[in-house]
Amino acid sequence: MSAQILSGTEVARTVRAEVAERVAALAERGISVGLATIMAGNDPGSEIYVRGKHRAAEAAGMLSFDVHLPESVSQETVEATIVALNADDQVDGMIVQLPLPDGLDGNRAMELIDPAKDADGLHPHNLGLLLLDRPGPRPATPTGIMRILEHYDIDVAGKLAVVVGRSFLVGRPLAMMLSAKGVDATAVQAHSRTQDLIEHTRRADILVAAVGRPQMFDADAIKPGAVVIDVGINRTDDGLVGDVDFESAAEVAQAITPVPGGVGPMTIASLLANTVAAAERKAETAG
Ligand code: NAP
């Protein structure tokens, strides 16, 4: 293996320490920072993820509010909960843990979140700000990826970035962030209907795999010297693996994120950063 390992675990530690400092600075002014999650049902994966968010928030000195609703909860109750948290002055960032149980409308729930409290950065208003290149909370996972690139001084300006996957959660906002003015990568958005996908990935200076198919890209799909960002989280009989065949890809790539320990830890760090930024904006407005 010759590639440099881009450790999201290490970068996330740095981001979380920065967030803790910002929370402490607000505390000195008598201002608390709070993160609330709303979860419905008992999906074990979601429960683990939500617990992780609360642990991280508390470790950063934030208040954390865990609203856990039953599987049988009505859409009205979910919406009333969001409206109440919008009005709660102690809550600066809010997350609706998706998916909601069958029969509930997750999109409608997300759209009810006050965009100023949108810790995930996925509210349509905030996605619009991203498109317009105006400040606002950015989607957490793509923000984490941009921070990894910045942390390791990977210059993407003028480079060809191929982003495989076009979800609103990862691929689409990431391609927008990579091609924003001042970042200046040439971003290509690939997806399941892309013809000759491997021909595209083989030309990529930066390859981002955000598909959700175990180890679909190996050395053959990667340009020698490329930077490889593996967003995929796939549970297999051999444990957790990414969308990239790490061993083989690491032979040709210049740098690569591992799974686990790559992009994953950055998502929580980014939503904490969105939450403290929301509290800072509120404090500024209040004078
Ligand atoms: P998603 O909504 O299912 O989107 C997957 C994307 O991959 C779609 O755009 C799909 O194309 C594309 N795709 C599917 N099969 C393909 C193929 N054979 N060739 C090329 N493109 C293909 O998934 P997501 O939410 O973006 O998540 C992607 C992966 O990242 C998952 O493994 C997820 O667990 C992981 N993830 C990780 C984090 C983290 O914190 N590390 C955060 C979020 C997601 P179409 O649009 O044409 O269907």
Image: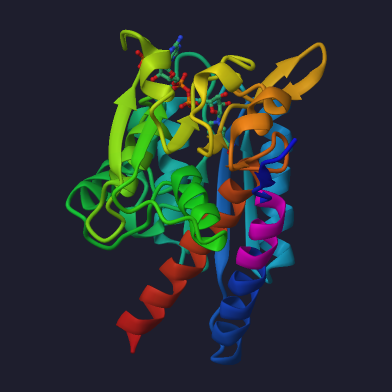
Determine the image quadrant of residue 48. Answer: top right
Q: Residue at x 58, y 42 (%)?
A: 254
2 or 211, which is in the foreground?
Answer: 2
Image quadrant holding the N terminus, namely top right
Instruction: Identify which residue is drawn at 80% across, 21% down.
Output: 239
Q: Considering the image in quadrants, where does the C terminus appear? A: bottom left
- Point out the residue furthest to the right here: 238
Report if residue 13 lies within the magenta region: yes
Residue at x 69%, y 23% (from the top left corner): 248
Q: Nearer the viewer, residue 112 or 175?
A: 175
Residue 91 at least partly seen: no
Residue 123, how many percent across, how many down? Answer: 33, 44
Question: Residue 153: percent from the left, percent from the top?
Answer: 51, 61
| Part of the protein shown in magenta | 8-15
Q: Does residue 284 sit above or below 162 in this rendering?
A: below
Which coloring applies here? rainbow
Q: Is residue 268 left or right of residue 159?
A: right
Tell whether position 121 is magenta: no
Along the line of sight, the residue nearer the viewer: 10 or 106: 10
Q: Is residue 270 above or below residue 122?
A: below
**Residue 214 location, quadrant:** top right
Q: Is residue 154 left or right of residue 20?
A: left
Q: Residue at x 60, y 73 (%)?
A: 18
Q: Is residue 198 visible?
A: yes
Left or right: where 35 falls relative to 78:
right
